[in-house]
Image: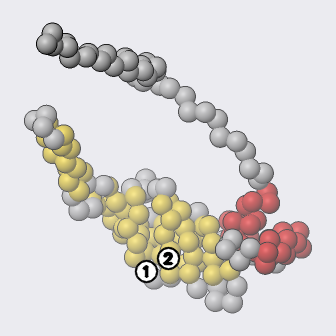
């Protein structure tokens, strides 16, 4: 059994007994935290949506630390501009102790109808994935608005192309012979 949890803006696949580094949590070492669940796989079926939100993943905080240093180097050629900065992300080390499926129930028939409608779309065009077909049915395509200019951009009009001047031809002077 595994679950996908979301913490610190990232998603992590966790298994009971596994140790995971997540973004800094406001919890002391030795305390128990509950992580929000996005998906649970119990070995037989995949549980998502509201049913997965009812499930809980509990983890024990082992400690806090920092990740390896990441070097950020900014450079602009031919300008003499170089800047080197480093960054170490604060992390919390947690050990997953339990994945509980409290309140997990079967999917309602309305969801099954949406999937069946998506399968029809997929049969017509096999290049379209099922998930894309469901999203395409729910939201009609909207036109993109024209790109807006920010304060720093200035609209520059190109002058109209000028036609070349007519060529002048000169005839050689005739000799008086």
Q: Position of residue 97 (x, y in %)?
A: 50, 78
As displayed, is residue 64 above or below residue 42? above
Q: How many marks?
A: 2
- Is residue 81 visible in the rendered image? The answer is yes
| The furthest residue to the top | 176
Assess disc 1: are there few (<14), some (14-19) or many (≥20) residues with their C-alpha within 10 Å of its C-alpha: few
Q: Quadrant of residue 25?
A: bottom left
Q: Position of residue 39 (x, y in %)?
A: 63, 72
Q: Colour mode? A: secondary structure
Gap in Å between the C-alphas at discs 2 and 1?
7 Å
As displayed, is residue 64 above or below residue 75? below
Q: Nearer the viewer, residue 169 or 46?
A: 169
Residue depicted at x 12% and y 37%: 78
Which element type, helix, strand or loop, lies under badge 2?
Answer: strand
Q: Quadrant of the N terminus?
A: bottom right
Q: Position of residue 127 (x, y in %)?
A: 67, 74
Residue depicted at x 64% and y 35%: 145
Residue depicted at x 43% and y 53%: 26
Label 2–label 1 contact, CB within 8 A: yes
Give left or right: position of 11 versus 69.
right
Q: Quadrant of residue 104?
A: bottom right
Which element type, helix, strand or loop, lies under badge 1?
Answer: loop
Q: Position of residue 54 (x, y in %)?
A: 70, 67
Assess disc 2: are there few (<14), some (14-19) or many (≥20) residues with their C-alpha within 10 Å of its C-alpha: some
| The furthest residue to the left | 80
Find disc 1 in the rendering and name its residue: 18
Q: Which mark is residue 14?
A: 2
Residue depicted at x 48% and y 69%: 12
Give left or right: position of 148 versus 155.
right
As displayed, is residue 151 above or below residue 104? above
Q: Quadrant of the C terminus?
A: top left
């Amino acid at each position: 059994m595994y679950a996908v949890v979301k913490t610190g803006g990232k998603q992590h696949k966790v298994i009971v007994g596994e140790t995971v580094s997540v973004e800094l949590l406001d919890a002391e070492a030795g305390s128990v935290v509950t992580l929000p669940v996005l998906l649970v796989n119990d070995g037989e079926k995949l549980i998502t949506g509201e049913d997965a939100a009812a499930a809980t993943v509990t983890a024990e905080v082992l400690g806090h630390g920092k990740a390896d240093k990441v070097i950020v180097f900014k450079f602009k050629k031919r300008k003499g501009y170089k800047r080197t900065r480093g960054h170490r992300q604060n992390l919390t080390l947690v050990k997953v102790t339990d994945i509980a499926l409290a309140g997990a129930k079967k999917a309602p028939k309305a969801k099954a109808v949406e999937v069946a409608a998506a399968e029809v779309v997929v049969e017509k065009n096999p290049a379209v994935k099922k998930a894309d077909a469901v999203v395409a049915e729910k939201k009609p395509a909207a036109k993109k608005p024209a790109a807006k200019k920010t304060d720093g951009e200035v609209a520059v009009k190109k002058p109209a192309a000028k036609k070349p001047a007519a060529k002048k031809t000169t005839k050689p002077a005739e000799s008086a012979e």
